[in-house]
Image (spheres, grey):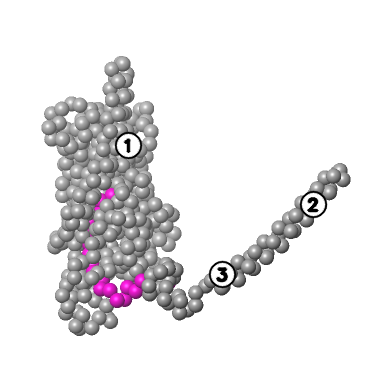
Amino acid sequence: MSDALIQRMKELEAELEKLRSQLKGSSGAGAELEAMSSPSPNESTRCKSDGSTSSGKKDRKKAGKERPFDFSGHPRRHVALRLAYLGWAYQGFAVQENTDNTVEARLFEALLKTRLIQDRQSSNYHRCGRTDKGVSAFSQVVTIDLRSTQFCGGLGITLPESVDVPTKSKAAASELPYVKMLNRVLPLDIRVLDWAPAADGFSARFDCQSRTYRYYFPRGSLDVALMADAAKRYEGTHDFRNLCKMDVGNGVLQFERTILSATVTPVQPQHGSSTDQHDLFIFEIKGLAFLYHQVRCMMAVLLLIGQKLEAPEIINQLLDVEKNPRKPQYSMAVDFPLVLYDCHFDGLSWKQEAEEVTYVLSALQQHWTQSAVKAHVLHGMIQALEARGAASAGHCWLVEGSRQRKYRPLLERPCCESLESRISHFVKRGRLEREEGENGGETVHRGKRSKHSHNSSSLPASSESPKQRTDQEVED
């Protein structure tokens, strides 16, 4: 290394040391200047009172943020909330242990942000159903206790213990605008439609009278008349173990369900006599409750019938669990066309706010405009290719997985495990237990209670397990 370079390095080090000493000196002077310019306690009080400085306000805001919200001074009201959401971007409705990308997670974030609840565990929360990944809803219903303004009492109102009698008898105030508060902080693809006061024991889960699903699909090369005839075979009370995912591990051991109606109709009634392959149809099914993946399995079989790969009688054969006790292996219909369209309850008086209905409508119109334009762009491209002589393969794009080159009839395929085999498997793993029945030693299988179960004595009744499924809950 040259002498000139060594000399230059020494000069730079000396200059750096000089700058450091100057910086220390200026820091000390700055601190002294700050102490001299700081107002005395009296001056600070004066500034706060005459508004000449904002430091006092900032201090108060900071102190306010640190002070927790006191829920004990507010009434609570048991209400039902009706939600609409586009489920395509979410991993389902219900909160899950392995992801926070669920509709319910966004809902609770909004409830906590608006201070309508203190926490989920104490909110007395129930959902009507747990829609699957990619499934949407127009009428999902939940019941929950929310903060209220109604010190005078009323339907679903629980007053705080600290409220005295004169306060209880004062004139009623207007209720909090629940719908508006939540919609201002929820994502645009999740909307609260309306709310209703509910009696304390009312549950969205157990008091639902019926649920209605809709599955949208294009005509394509399907025989929709044959599908409509076949759908009627689902109606009535049947054992649907061959038309669902048997969720034995979570205690679902009974697979009888009642279907009130099942229809296949065009979205536009005037298209009933049309033959355009781009016409849209709806498979609408109404039932008391549904099993895990039941609607998507039912739709998958209808699509096979519409392609004339199976006869309508296959439904009767799958419902006959005496002759066919094990489910044939087949792929479900895809998730995104499925919508929880309606949940029916008796005794609820829904309260709508005109401004919020308009607000929700505007958001949906925006979604529709974008989707409709994209659909017509694609339609135009398809027509252009068809005009050039391209021929459609006639493939049904609404079934998961790849299509077999040679179709194998359902009843000739390998079958899944039997119900009895699944029960034995989960008994060995400790997920289920056997008990002696009261009628002469008959063995009864019963799912063990989860430590997070909403019936557990260790937790409030609102804390439903993210993984818990029961016979009374919508599962698709």
Q: Secondary structure at mark 1?
A: loop
The answer to whether residue 196 of the structure is visible from this angle is yes
Residue at the spot x=27%, y=42% of the render?
366
Residue 133 in the image: above or below residue 201:
above
Cβ atoms at labels 3 and 1 below 8 Å apart = no
Cβ atoms at labels 2 and 1 below 8 Å apart = no
Residue 14 in the image: above or below residue 298:
below
Q: What type is the residue that disc 3 sits on?
A: Glu
* Snapshot quadrant of residue 304: top left
Residue 216 in the image: above or below residue 237:
above
Residue at the spot x=77%, y=51% of the render?
12
Q: What type is the residue that disc 2 sits on?
A: Glu
- Across and down, in percent, residue 9 comes to 80, 49
Q: Residues within 10 Å of mark 2 (few under 14, many from 20)?
A: few
Check residue 127 in the rendering and tell me which mark sits there, or answer none.
none
Query: Which dot, 2 or 1, sits closer to the camera?
Result: 2
Residue to which mark 1 is pinned: 399
Residue at the spot x=31%, y=49% of the render?
188
Check residue 34 in the rendering and tell me which mark sits there, or answer none.
3
280 and 305: which is toward the camera: 280
Instruction: Give me the C-alpha separation between circle 2 and circle 1.
Output: 77 Å
Question: Going from the N terminus, do you reach mark 3 or mark 2 first?
Answer: 2
Question: Going from the N terminus, do you reach mark 3 or mark 1 first?
Answer: 3
Which contiguous range is marked in magenta? Answer: 62-85
